[in-house]
Each structure stands twice: as C-alpha cells, then as structure tokens.
Amino acid sequence: MRRFFLVIVVTMLFLSIATAQTTNWINYIKSDRIYAITEEDNFMWIGTYGGLIKIDKSTGAKTIYDETNSPLPDCEVKAIAIDGNGTKWIGTQYGGLTSFDGSEWITYNTSNSGLPGNSVISLAAEENGTIWIGTEYDGLAAFDGTNWRKYDRSDYMGLGEEIRFLAIDENGTKWIASCPRASSFGASLISFDDEQWESYELSIGGINSITIDSNGKKWIGGTEGMSSFDSTNFVTYNTSNSGLPSDFIHSIAIDNNGIKWIGTEDGLVSFDNLDWLIYTSDNSGLPKNSVELVVSDLNGTKWIDTYGGYVATYNGTTWEDVDTRVSGILSNDIRDIAIDPGGLKWIASIGGIASFDGNNWQNYTPSNTGLLNSHIYSILVDEEETIWFGTQSGLIAFDGTEWINYYSSDTVQFYEVYAIASDNHGLKWFGTSNGLISFDGKDWTTYISSNSGLPSDDIFSLAVDKNNVKWIGTMAGLTSYDGLNWTTYNPSNSGLPHDEVYAVAIDKNDVKWIGTKLGGLAVFDGTTWEVYNTENSGLPKNWVLSIDIDSGGARWLGTWAGGLVKFDESGWTVYNTSNSELPDNIVNSVCIDADNTKWIATKTKGLASFNENGNPAQVKDDYPIPAGIRIFPNPLKNLLKIELDAGVHVSKIEIINLQGSLVKILKNLRNHSVSDFSSLPDGIYLLRITTDKDVYVEKLVKQQ
C-alpha cells in the first residue's frame, strides 16, 4: 500500500501547490511585512506584503488570497476594516480599495469610482456603514455604498494628503493622523465630527496609532512617546516618566479588561493604569523586540507582529508563533534561478538560497550551511549536478551532501560573483566584479583587463557556444574568448548598441542574443548585427537584464521596469503588472523548465511562475482514495459531501491551498458529512485524508 510521507525541511513545509488552476500564474512572495490585523468572529484577517491571509483561530488553518487566486488587485494589503454586515474592506498599496463579502469581490479605484487615490493605507468603518478611507497621497474619502466624498485642504487646511491612521469613537467623531504628502515630518492629530475640524498639538512626535478605550479615552502612540486624551486633558508618557522602555510607539491595543498593550521599538508593554510590564524576546515568547502591531481579540488573546513579519499570540499564559508566510522564499529580491536535472528549482536571493520541488521548500542560509554570505547573485548546475553559487564575497558549491566554500587566497581573489558558466570541457567560469576566473577543479586562473583582452573587470554575464567560445558581457562591451584570442565588440566597432552587457544567451543555431543596459536587445550571428529597441520593436524598455530560450525557440526577456517579454515569429508579447499577474516589472532572471513553465525572478516581489497553457500540476494522484470513502462532487461549487462505509474511520481531512498552507480541517466525520467551501477561492486544492490505516491524497477542484 502506498503511503504519503511528509518531509520536514529546515523550519517549514509547504505542500505545493503549484498546480493548474484558473490562472496561468503563480506568485511566491515573502510576506515579511504585516500591515493590518483585524478580527471577525473566529477568524483573523491579516494584511501582508504578500497578500491577504485569513486564519481560523480554532485550528490555525490559513486561506491566502493574492492576485493569482482571487480578484484582489494588489497583493500588498495595507489596511483592513470590517463593516456591520461582515464585508471586508481591503486597502492596497497600488490597486485601490476592494470589498469582499465572502463570495463577491468589488474593486474601487480612481478609474471606476470616486476614490481619490489608489494607495489606500488606512480604513475605518462607521456604524452607519460608511467606510472612511485614508490614502497615502490624495487625502481622505468617505463612501456610503453609493456616494463618494473627498476631503482635502479645501475642506480643512490642516488636513494633509497622507492619512496614516483612522479611528472612529462612539459619537461618530473621526480621529485622523495626517501629514503632508511625502513629508519627512510626523503625522499630526485631527478630529472631525462631520461638521467641525480640530487640530491638536501633542509632544509625542509623529503619530503612528490611535486607539479608543471603552470610556472614550483616546490613546495615541507617537515617535516620541504616548498620550492619552479624555476630551479635555492630555497625559503624556515617555521613558522619563513611565515604565515605557522606548519612546517610539508603533501600536496600541486595549483588551477586555482595559489593559493597554503597547508595541514599542524595544518590546511589548502592558499598562493597567498603575503597573507597567515589559515583555522582550529574552523574558518571553516575543519573536523580536521591535513590536510593530498589536491587536487584542475578543478572547483577550494578543496578536503581535514584530519586525520582519514574525507574528505571535499571547493569551496571558502561553505564547505561540503564528505562521504568516505565503511561500518558502527567503527574500523578495530574487537574483537568479537554475533548474537541476530532477526538476528542482534553485533560487538565489538576497536572503539566501531556496530550493523548491513543486511541493516542498528548503532554505539554506549561513545558519544551517557553510554559506558565509546570504547575498546570492548567481547559480549554475554543472554536468555532475553540483550546484555552484556566486555570492557577495565568493563561491560555494553543493554536491547534494556537502557544502564547499572557496575563499579568497594567494592564488585567487573573490569579489561579487555575478555570473557562472561551465564550458564544453567542464571548466567553470566565474564573472566577478574584479575580472573573469576559470577553475579546472584544481587550479584557478584570473583574467583582468591588465593581463588579458578584457575591456573591463566588471563581468555581468557569461555564455559558452558550441565551439567552446566564451562570450563575456562586461561594463565595456561584449568579449569573446576562444582560449587564445580575445575579441571585444562595442558600439564603436560593431553593431552592439550599448557598452554594458547584462545578458547573453545562445540559441540552437549558435546565434547570440545580447541584452544591454540602455541599448535594447542585440542579435549577432557571427557576421551580422540586428538591434531591437523601444523605437523599432515591441520591446517596452531598453534595459534587458536576462534572456532564456524555450523549447520552441521563443526568446523570453527580463527587463528593468518593462516586465517580461516574449519574442517569437509572431512578434512581441509583453507581460507586466498592468496586463498580467506578473508581480513586479523588474525581472532579474528568467529560467524555463521542461514543462515550458517560465520561472521569473523579480526585484521586489519575489518569484513567479508562468505557463501560457496553465501551470502543470505538481500534486500527483499517486495516493488514491480507497473504496469506502467517497468525496464528491469534484469539481465542486460550494458544498462538499463525504460518505464513509461502515468500519471506515477518518480522523481528519486537511485541505491545503495553492501556496501550501492549511486552509481547512474537517474532523469528527460521520458516515454522511457536508462541508461548506463557498468562501474558498476557485482553484485546485489538496485533500489529505488521514484514516486509522493510512494517509491518502486527492486533488480537489473548486470552481463556480
């Protein structure tokens, strides 16, 4: 009988799910910033850099919504408010305002509504159903479900363009932290009762948060302390007159007992109006000392976000970590991607190395490997399946078991290693910020501009043609080296349109495809040059960072600020953040796997995969459900039915979503059970069924 074994890798397990779904895109982002946490009954809604997360407080199950699996217009969720009808209002960094009632999504932006700006960073829901919207650059707005009203300096001179925080008291008065657009000064406090505006001068610096207690008292956190305001008097607390460990107050929450929970730069503080208690990473389960957000739920449990997106809960007795990650990547700045013969993706980032087999992520950092530096710039999988990594300060190789560091020595000096290639004889070539280095397994040879034909010591790209000629992209042109002769091509002696060459790819006909910094794409067949740029082609930007060629001969280009570009016989196709689910228009690297899926490294939004025919399923039906268990319909719309024969005992069924996160657990199953899946986004999920005899896996398709 087949069994489904779970492999725990490093600190986490993400079961795929890079599966075919209604979209051709899957995005993998490191959600290292938490912007908002809001409670709704038994669920917590969390706004992150990588999407919107719904967490079941009872089970810990996560549902993740992003641009690829839901109508959410932008995965950077800056604010969340929930109105009296349970509708979620979601403010995004670039996509405007979205409402979600559990089934229908509606997005409001500057093109289709009265929203004054698409960067929504604060929200508050009034009892009458009006949503108050704070934008980053375009002031304050109110929306009652039908009508929009914008507020700016024409309404009140003290109201700035940036609305950093909003709160509404029991009288309907709005309390606003506001500052001028792109101001280096902190936000000031303003109140508005629908008729009168009023400004307040506080001595706590710029305002970061406003919380209102059950008596109507306002608690205001600033960059230089904390104040309370009872509508008559302000009381200021700082490190000189209270138990606060830091004057920088990020967030304030108030629990059911009226205790204030204060997130500071140097720990979490509780204050019951008499005593101050300080929690740090040394004396408690607090993940980090910089506490950026605190929320107290209806049960009195504190949800605490610390620097780097590390979240924990504290119920007064027990601390528990909360996993808000939406993928296994280590940084959103991905520099390179390589795929080994087994299909394993190797991902180089500014945070270290990750590998991904479509089901599991494994992370490699200085803490669990021989890595000396977590800034990884380049990857090569050689003919012996050794993985070579170029770092900020040298080289490291991994043979699947052992990590081997190559340090600077008397024979070789390593600097930043930007490119790696293996030639037809197995020699390794490394492009660095201080020349070209070759390695035959024993000896190192360094080529710099003073001892070779290299025009520059800054090497950005490498490729080897069928004749074993090395093609070297430098800051001062493209150079070829056949082992004896050096030939340099630059704008003055060839058709190369720009000196700085960031990418070189060679097709099956030995034609060189060359990406330049500002000159666009050049093609060189050994005799003739052809140049494609923004003026004579569909290329959106002239800075080409990477090139790969698919099995059909189409060229895929990663550009700076122009997105991903396909160029084939039919012409040019551009994928960017406006017309596709590409998360970032700066594409550092493109790598194409055996399924013709493009793996895309972006500068600020992590890793993306794209397949024009749909991302192929990584979850296989290798562990079919046995007779005696019937789960239907599949595909389903809303209700999933489970029937068990007599004598069949299922302890639980776990539902895992696209990013590998547990989204639902079904327990206490009877012979006939029905579960409501109407709130789940359309897509493919994994059912993991645990019985008293085995564990089985089945794919489940959710579609309306």
Image (cartoon, rainbow, N blue to C red):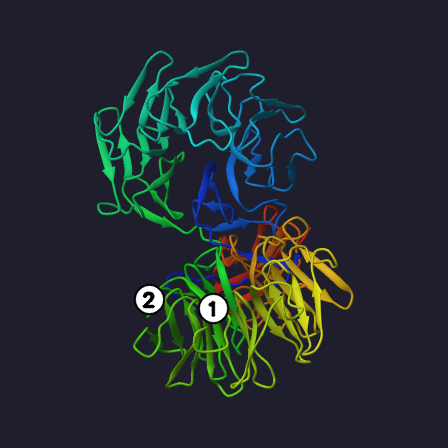
Q: Which residue is mark 2?
A: 372
In x, y percent, where is residue 538? 73, 58
Question: Would residue 545 appear left or right of 308 to someone viewing this image?
Answer: right
Q: Residue at x 65, y 41 (%)?
A: 104
Judged left or right of residue 678, residue 368 is left
In front here: 219 or 650? 219
Q: Residues within 10 Å of mark 2 (few under 14, many from 20)?
A: some
| Location of residue 384 with respect to 127 vertically, above or below | below
Q: Is residue 28 left or right of residue 597?
A: left
Q: Quadrant of residue 568?
A: bottom right
Q: What is the residue that sits farthest to the right in this orientation?
A: 570
- Which amino acid, mark 1? Ser
Q: Residue furthest bottom?
A: 425
Q: Secondary structure at mark 1?
A: strand
Distance of label 2 from label 1 (alpha carbons): 15 Å
Query: Is residue 366 positioned above or below 52 on the image?
Result: below
Q: Amino acid at mark 2?
A: Leu
**Vertical side of 37 occupied by 420: above or below:** below
Mark carried by residue 473? none
* Labels 2 and 1: the sequence-earlier one: 2
- The vertical placement of 423 against 559, above or below, is below
Number of dots carrying numbers: 2
Residue 209 at what x, y percent from top left?
Answer: 40, 30
Rendered residue at 49%/18% (across/down): 158
Q: Does residue 630 show up?
A: no
Instruction: Give the structural element (helix, strand or loop) at label 2.
Output: loop
Question: Residue 452, image x and y in percent?
Answer: 47, 78
Q: Is residue 94 visible?
A: yes
Q: Residue at x 27, y 42 (%)?
A: 317
**In this view of the protein, which residue sits in the foreground, 22 or 693?**
22
Residue bearing the label numbered 1: 378
